[in-house]
Amino acid sequence: MTDEFAAASAAKNGQPLLRMDGVGRTFQMGEVAVVVLTNITLDIRRGEFLALVGPSGSGKTTILNLIGGMDRPSVGSVLYKGRNLADASDRELTRYRREEVGFVFQFYNLVPNLTARENILVSTEIASAPRDADEVLRLVGLEDRAEHFPAQLSGGEQQRVSIARAVAKNPELLLCDEPTGALDFKTGKRVLRLLVDLNRQLGKTVVVITHNAALAEVADRVVHLRSGEISSMEENQNPVAPEEVVW
Amino acid sequence: MVRALNRKLAREICRSKGLLLAITSIIAVGVMCYVAMQSAYLNLSAAKTRYYRMCRMADFWVDVKKVPLAELEALGRIRGVAEYQPRITFPATVDLENVPEPLNGQVISLPDRREPTLNDILLRQGGYFTDRRENEVIVNDAFARARNIYPGQWIHLLLNDRRQELFVVGTAISSEFTYLLGPGTLVPDPETYGVFYVKRTFAEDVFDFDGAANQVVGRLSPELAGESNDTLRSAETLLEPYGVFSVTPLRLQASNQFLSNEIEGLGAIAAVVPTIFLAVAAVVLNVLITRLARQQRVVIGTLKALGYTNGQVFAHFLKFGLSVGVAGGVLGALLGYTASAGMTQVYQHFFQFPDLRSQLHWNTFALGMAVSLVCAIAGSLHGAWSMLQLQPAEAMRPEPPARGGAILLERLTLVWKLFSSGWRLALRSVFRHRVRSAAAVFAAMMGAALLVTGFMMVQSQDYFLDFQFYRTMRSDIDLVLKGSQGREALDEVRQLPGVDHAEPQLMVAGTFEHGPFRRKEAIIGLLPDARLTIPHDAEGRRIPLPRSGLVLSRRMAEILHVRPGDQVSFTPVQEERRTLEATVAQIADSYMGLTIYADIHYLSRLMGEEFAVSGVQLQTDPRPDVLRRLNHELKQLPGVEAISDRQRLVENLTKTLLQNQFVFIGVLVIFAGVIFFGSVVNSSMVNLAERQREVATFRALGYSKWSIGAMFLRESLLTNMTGAVLGLPIGYGLMWLTATAYANDLVRLPVIATPAIWGWALGWAVVFALLAHAVVQWRINTMNYLEALKVKE
Ligand SMILES: Nc1ncnc2c1ncn2[C@@H]1O[C@H](COP(=O)(O)OP(=O)(O)OP(=O)(O)O)[C@@H](O)[C@H]1O
Ligand SMILES: [Mg+2]
């Protein structure tokens, strides 16, 4: 954690980790403006496990990108520990992504010319307090595929490397875009268990996108998205253990 | 720190090693040219400066008929003249025992005892003159070595009609003759032309020059160097009563002019050629890195999402370009150093230096390296930059498809219909990838320009040889007589055995004036129906000698600013120095010297004589035994000042030029090949990589490898040929610039463009495009289609 963010967090203790306020996102495609998100207001509490569900094209990935500092909102503010990411410089956003966020991409985005382990090293080498690459590979059950290139791995295996890469950074905020989309029942549960453990035992904040409603049962809170707006939000009083989820 | 990324880099470099090698070679050639030429340039100019200082090279030469030494004192008082020295110098015929033909040389007087002299000699073997004999000689080193002459031997020179026996005390070199040329030639031939230094007292004796001189060499005061023209003009005026043949500033001294031209030329080439190569390399590299960055758009987005800074990601791509730059730079520097050593060796053959060494010039290395890196950085910068501007979220989305609309050409329906569907596909692709196509066109343009310049250079030399030595001056042997003589001299030569044909010449040196323009030059009188010297114009038409009036060479006409019909005044370097008026009748073309022709009868009359002869040109019987007898006779012939074996001169010149041409063309074609090949391989490979899925789909649809290859070949032919055609005029322009820059009063290069040159240049362009395409075709043939369809970029 950088001093800056730490100082900010100390000053604003008791506040949410991240606050989206009146956020909208519009994409300009030539002459037409595509409105993807409108008036999103959402608090993400420190240490919570949040699920983001909604149909395809509803803007889930777009929200996650804004949370992860990979994009800037067209209107509204995204406050992380009190700092507005909307008007942060490229430099500050880069530092935010590097120090605070772990991202599991919807399409894995592994670097083709690097082995599984090297794909993890690529992220740990620039992190300040990373975990051991081999250890996280073991956590996702890929210890014997460490030297394989993405092209030699199945889709599900690639997805797990992607998760390992995010986890290995040991970030404050873990953002997962359909982390189990390509996984079967058994490995899906195993990955879910990993995320829950990170959340419950290490106190990391986790945001998971899914359009599998069953999966959302694990979360503390579920946010429903429809056509770029938050349609409903529900607190989960008794989150179930990953093992009990019915797929 | 980012070791994983470095591993990615290493793998990517490995995977595209062929392509990188192609670009590396372009850079390497550029750096090599720079290092080689620049080192040779530095070696040569340093050697020149040292040599001139060591020998105390003169700043000017004044040739006069005969001036008493006492009269020279006034020369020292002229403002700007720092120092002067009188000399006696005459052409000589050298009679070597075991050499049948008479050889030519120049005799120059030196002080009897060693003392500081201008145009001093550096002894190579033996020593300076002794007090033991009057008749001692120091021979120039190259001639001595070519003819096996050593100190302690006796040699014979024909001086002033007398056969003199001289004792060789030493051999020497002098900066005055760094590039030693006999009369009428362009390349040194140490076997046939020598310089012979004799004691001043001996020269006075032999040439009846007691207390007189016929040449003054001098140095100008450095602080008044800007006014050297005035200084020399005053010297000329002062010496005018003694018959001034020529006043030659250092700038126009033959040896210095050839040497300085060579040095300047090297400097210019060292700037131009590498620029071409490095520009091509930067452009080609840019295409490659752009493709790489595009292809890795998602990777770039991911790295940025992971928290990599723009700088780190850019550094990653930069390293890719830099590896090429470093490899090209190092390879180029090493090759360049080797080449400069080779060039320096060639120069040692043509130029006589005491210490021409091939030296390591670290700053040249460093600059070559730096330029190559800058070129690599420039190439990468542009390529990766646009990808870095994207926010990671944006970068991770697939790139919007390229505009797929109709290209401009399609609107010209009539023209568009002319093309088959294959060519239409190629045209669309060429116009849609503007930057890549422009890069390919640019490279081909430079390659073709290089070829054209080179071929034109060779053509120009061939034309020069043919024009000057086979059509204009056609004699086998030229005799220069002592002074001007009557008709009997000619008749006497005609009697000699083996003389098939003899024609008289009359040379009259003097000063031409036309308005403010003046020039010292000689008129050559010829028979109107002369066969051995025939003035021509550039179109190859014979120019008939007018009964009265002069035929000026174009360069001389330009110097005097005259046109046919104009009057010029001419003051011969003769006893009474009357000024005559003559009409410029015609202009002839000439690529050597500033020749002026006139009818020998007309010229004789101008000089107040009925018929005068100062030289004879011979056409000889080629049979060896007859020739030997003729040579024997010529050695004894009185009244002859110099004999030049034109046949041998032309042979030597032709041989030297052809030899160099061979190497020159070879190197040139290889260089141009590197450009063509590298550029075609690069753009086709990039094209292929971008269209892997398309190609795989075509294959799946049942197209053959060859018809897919043809798609790419059409594209590379389109860009390559367009570029090559555009490069033709650029090459012509470069040649024209070179010829103009090099033109001087001694030699000029004709600018000749024949269809054959365009043909050759385009032909080579096609050959290289096909060769490069073979590599691309091989790639297509060995491509794994399943993988190509599966791979998600
Ligand atoms: N850069 C962009 N330019 C234009 N439109 C965009 C851009 N990014 C997203 N969109 C559009 O915004 C909408 C929401 O996209 P988003 O990726 O957030 O959906 P999603 O909820 O993640 O869907 P899925 O479940 O299919 O991943 C889509 O219609 C998409 O086409
Ligand atoms: Mg999505």
Image (cartoon, coloured by chain):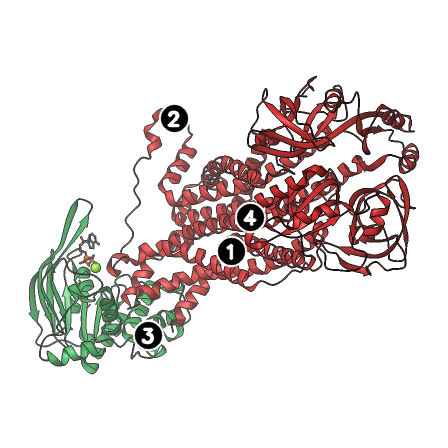
- The local secondary structure at tag 3 comes to helix
Q: Which residue is mark 4?
A: B269
Chain containing mark 3: A
Callout 3, which amino acid? Answer: Thr
Q: Which residue sits at x=31%, y=71%?
A: A165
Q: Which residue is mark 1?
A: B24
Please give left or right for residue B549 compared with residue B714 in the image.
Answer: right
Q: CA distance from mark 1 to mark 4?
A: 21 Å
Say whether residue A7 is left or right of residue A132: left
- Residue B154 can be seen in this image: yes
Residue wearing tag 2: B415
Estimate the spatial distance between the alpha carbons at disc 2 and disc 1, rounded to whole Å.
40 Å
* 2 and 1 marks in contact (CB < 8 Å): no
For residue B414, above or below residue B649: above
User: What's the CA distance linking mark 1 and mark 3?
Assistant: 34 Å
Q: Say whether mark 4 and mark 1 are on the same chain.
A: yes
Q: Is mark 3 within 8 Å of ligand 2?
A: no
The residue sitting at the top extreme is B547
**Residue B613 occupies quadrant:** top right
Where residue B553 sits: x, y (%)? 64, 28
Q: Nearer the viewer, mark 4 or mark 3?
A: 4
Marks 2 and 3: same chain? no
- Amino acid at the residue labelled 2: Val
Q: Colour of chain B?
A: red
Disc 3 target residue: A124
Residue depicted at 81% across the width and 59% down the height: B128
The tag earlier along the polypeptide, 2 or 1, is 1
Q: Nearer the viewer, residue A234 or B414?
A: B414
Q: Front-most of B104 and B575? A: B575
Sort mark 3 into few (<14), some (14-19) or many (20+) by Cα contacts within 10 Å.
many
Residue B100 position within the rendered picture, expressed as x and y whole percent measured from the top left: 90, 41
Q: For mark 1, name the chain.
A: B
